[in-house]
């Protein structure tokens, strides 16, 4: 299977702290892969480095074969990689539909001059709304399209962030604890939505997650980190039985 993300000997330090230490990981296309490990193991730093929020000190990161190591986040986003956060960041007073629509790329009405030329963007606005409705249906938010984002539950907010990534054209999404603080029923629904998006749209998800009792039922592969290094990666049943991972959790 094709590797959509290739992380090659990447390191990232903050002063004397080496948060990511010579890490190499491949994420296969059209899979759900979770990144696990004790607190402080370097998971979030690795995700932020992939997304361009941090610049790797050494090593390289490839997205669909293109080197993105030195690119800023907005350029990586335009290449089809989106990143969500543990605490969602939405436009709270806008509706769910409006939050989805503002994520659409290359709208002719975004610029000052273009915004004054209504004829140049009104058709695009209608097309964007139609796509947004379809996207909200995909992520299970169609019934609340007219609700303000601030009224959503925590799980729905995370689904909306995924939907905004889809509106931006993302085919690869980095998720930071998508079911943290979410009730078990909705947590299962979120992973079921991710599976549907993988199957129906060919999307790839690289996910930080601590709630393994739920996540392991759905994922294709697991990457385990501790102390900034990769301990194990592969099929869930193999990684979870690795004695190095068990020792890392007990020691953490």
Image (cartoon, helix red, strand yellow):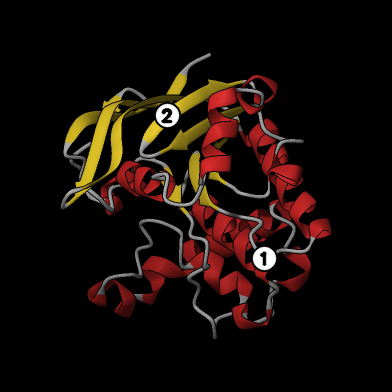
- Horizontal side of 39 relative to 156 (left or right) equals left
**Residue at the far bottom in the pictured view:** 93
In this rendering, the answer to whether 224 lies above or below 145 is above
The image quadrant of residue 235 is: top right
- Horizontal side of 113 relative to 38 (left or right) equals left
**Residue at the far top in the pictured view:** 1
Q: Tell me if mark 1 has few (under 14), some (14-19) or many (20+) residues whose alpha carbon lies within 10 angstroms of its own.
A: few
Between 103 and 230, the one lying in front of the other is 230
Label disc, if present, on residue 88 of the rendered structure: none
Q: Mark 1 points at which residue?
A: 181
Does any portion of residue 209 appear in the rendered image?
Answer: yes
- In the image, what residue occupies the spot 68% across and 64% down? 155
SS for callout 2? strand
- In the image, what residue occupies the spot 24% across and 35% down? 11
Q: How far from the left and from the top, in percent, is residue 136?
A: 67, 59
Mark 2–mark 1 distance (CA, rounded to whole Å):
26 Å
Disc 2 and disc 1 in contact, CB within 8 angstroms: no
In this rendering, the answer to whether 226 lies above or below 3 is below
- In the image, what residue occupies the spot 72% across and 39% down? 196
Does any portion of residue 27 appear in the rendered image?
Answer: no
Q: Earlier in the sequence, mark 2 or mark 1?
A: 1
In this rendering, the answer to whether 95 lies above or below 14 is below
Q: Which of marks 2 and 1 is in front?
A: 2
Q: Mark 2 points at which residue?
A: 230
């Amino acid at each position: 299977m094709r590797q959509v993300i290739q992380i090659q000997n990447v390191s990232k330090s903050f002063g004397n702290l080496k948060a990511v230490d010579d890490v190499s990981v491949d994420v296969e296309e059209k899979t759900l892969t979770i990144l696990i490990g004790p607190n402080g193991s370097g998971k979030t730093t690795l995700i932020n480095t992939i997304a361009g929020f941090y610049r790797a000190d050494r090593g390289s990161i490839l997205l669909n074969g293109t080197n993105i190591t030195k690119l800023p986040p907005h350029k990586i986003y335009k290449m089809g990689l989106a990143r969500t956060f543990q605490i969602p960041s939405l436009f709270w007073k806008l509706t769910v539909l409006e939050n989805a629509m503002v994520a659409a790329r290359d709208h002719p009405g975004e610029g000052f001059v273009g915004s004054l030329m209504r004829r140049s963007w009104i058709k695009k606005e209608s097309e964007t709304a139609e796509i947004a409705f379809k996207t909200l249906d995909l992520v299970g938010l169609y019934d609340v399209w007219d609700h303000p984002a601030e009224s959503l539950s925590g799980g729905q907010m995370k689904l909306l962030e995924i939907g905004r990534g889809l509106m931006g054209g993302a085919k690869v999404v980095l998720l930071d604890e998508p079911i943290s603080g979410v009730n078990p029923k909705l947590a299962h629904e979120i992973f079921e939505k991710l599976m549907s998006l993988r199957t129906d749209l060919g999307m790839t998800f690289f996910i930080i997650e601590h709630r393994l009792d739920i996540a392991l039922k759905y994922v294709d592969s697991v990457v385990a980190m501790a102390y900034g290094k990769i301990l194990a990666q592969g099929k869930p049943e193999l990684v979870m039985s690795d004695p190095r991972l068990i020792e890392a959790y007990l020691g953490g």
